[in-house]
């Protein structure tokens, strides 16, 4: 939606075709980004009728993991239009095929890899959230070397939210927003889902009397997130749980906290997640926290986040083994300097500055 907003503000007419129903939260998020919206298309034959009736300059296809068939379908029905495929996770960058097949349906895995190869070889442009050098390295397996853009969830607003004055004698307040993966869940083994180690990280933080505020994700059921409520029973005075919010309201609300976190215990020796992911992946929550004006705390095992933090001095990066020593990091940091640096980062990396890259990318195609 943010990319569409950039293009719309640059004079493009933008339209959304959605295969399913748009949630009320998403409707608030996208309402200013599109000239018109079609939803509940549901079936590929219905989509084909729509594609046959229109001739846009560009199709921008959101390619979600396990659903790459949509990208392939649009490419096969594009006529003279250019197709840009936008990836969040790239299946082959996430883990090896054989490791994914130990957990997921073999036919689904095979189809995703087949569609991924087709997209890399046939899309006019590809957008991803991975570090571009890492993405290009992976793309070599498909002999793709051009028309690839890294584009993150850059801050929409450079507004400076009011935050509490961080005093040395006050409890430090942390916030987590995003998907919650339970520990010891057979459908989410830690070797394929590193965030399954977040419960251990949260326990460490709470046992040190840090306040932790969790905003539940849209995509999690109460049963799936039960472990978080069990954790609250253990730490009733320092763990607080809130319902999800539309992104604009979420950013405003979480701005009152001291740090945004993306922490888990990670065992690199046992993980099946690839180095492409650890070295080049970037969570969107990182930019959500920064847009809210928050310094961030992440695992140094996630090397691109580690690089972002150290290069811009906008937070704390520490390894899983160092989590028990987090007090040492927090106590010696100049928090006021972190806040100033976050403000500078937002000003230099806001959506409408970075959006120039997006417009140039489209124009180059």
Image: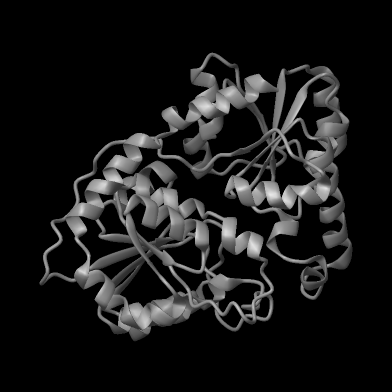
**Looking at this view, is 145 or 9 the one in front?**
145
Where 116 falls versus 8 (above or below)?
below
State the image coordinates of residue 23 (x, y, percent, origin top left).
Answer: 56, 44
Where 24 falls versus 233 (above or below)?
above
**Looking at this view, is 187 or 344 the one in front?**
344
> Taking 196 as reference, is 294 left or right?
left
Where 227 falls versus 163 (above or below)?
below
Q: Is the C terminus in the top left, top right, bottom left or bottom right quadrant?
A: top right
**Looking at this view, is 316 or 119 the one in front?**
316
> Taking 148 as reference, is 337 left or right?
left
Q: Residue furthest top?
A: 11
Q: Where is residue 313, by image quadrant?
A: bottom left
> Taking 233 as reference, is 133 left or right?
right
Q: Where is residue 324, by image quadrant?
A: bottom left
State the image coordinates of residue 254 (x, y, percent, origin top left).
Answer: 31, 54
For the point 19% across and 46% down, which residue is it?
A: 162
**Looking at this view, is 110 or 215 the one in front?**
110
Q: Where is residue 190, by image quadrant?
A: bottom right
Q: Is the N terminus in the top left, top right, bottom left or bottom right quadrant?
A: top right
Q: How is the image coloured?
A: one colour
State the image coordinates of residue 34 (x, y, percent, origin top left).
Answer: 56, 25
> Taking 247 as reference, is 40 left or right?
right
State the image coordinates of residue 92 (x, y, percent, origin top left).
Answer: 75, 58
For the point 88% across and 32% down, which residue is it?
A: 76
For the point 70% across and 53% down, which residue is it?
A: 90
- The number of numbered discs placed on residues in the rendered structure image is 0
Judge whether residue 340 can be spotted in this image: yes
Judge whether residue 224 can be spotted in this image: no
């Amino acid at each position: 939606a943010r990319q569409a907003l950039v293009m719309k503000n640059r004079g493009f007419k933008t339209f959304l075709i959605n295969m399913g129903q748009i949630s009320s939260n998403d409707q608030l998020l996208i309402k200013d980004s599109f000239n018109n919206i079609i939803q509940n298309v549901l079936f590929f034959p219905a989509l084909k009728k729509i594609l046959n009736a229109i001739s846009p300059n560009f199709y921008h296809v959101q390619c979600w993991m396990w659903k790459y068939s949509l990208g392939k379908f649009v490419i096969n029905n594009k006529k003279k239009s250019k197709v840009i495929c936008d990836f969040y996770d790239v299946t082959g960058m996430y883990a090896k095929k054989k490791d994914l097949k130990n957990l997921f349906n073999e036919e689904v895995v095979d189809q995703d890899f087949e569609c991924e190869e087709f997209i890399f070889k046939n899309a006019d442009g590809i957008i991803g959230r991975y570090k571009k050098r890492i993405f290009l390295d992976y793309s070599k397996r498909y002999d793709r070397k051009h028309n690839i853009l890294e584009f993150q969830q850059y801050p929409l607003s450079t507004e400076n939210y009011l935050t509490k004055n961080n005093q040395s004698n006050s409890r430090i307040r942390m916030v987590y927003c995003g998907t919650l993966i339970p520990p010891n869940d057979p459908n989410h083994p830690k070797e394929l889902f590193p965030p399954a180690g977040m419960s251990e990280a949260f326990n460490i933080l709470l046992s040190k009397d840090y306040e932790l505020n969790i905003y539940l994700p849209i995509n999690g059921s109460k049963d799936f997130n039960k472990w978080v409520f069990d954790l609250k029973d253990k730490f009733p005075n320092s763990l607080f749980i809130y319902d999800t919010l539309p992104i604009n309201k979420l950013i405003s609300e979480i701005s009152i906290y001291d740090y945004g976190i993306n922490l888990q215990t990670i065992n690199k020796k046992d993980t099946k997640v690839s180095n492409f992911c650890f070295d080049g992946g970037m969570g969107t929550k990182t930019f959500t926290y920064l847009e809210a004006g928050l310094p961030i705390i992440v695992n140094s095992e996630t090397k691109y986040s580690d690089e972002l933090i150290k290069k811009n001095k906008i937070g704390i990066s520490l390894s899983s083994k160092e989590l028990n020593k987090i007090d040492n990091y927090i106590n010696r940091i100049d928090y006021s300097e972190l806040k100033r640096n976050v403000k500078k980062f937002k000003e230099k990396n806001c959506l409408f500055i970075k959006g120039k890259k997006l417009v140039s990318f489209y124009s180059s195609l």
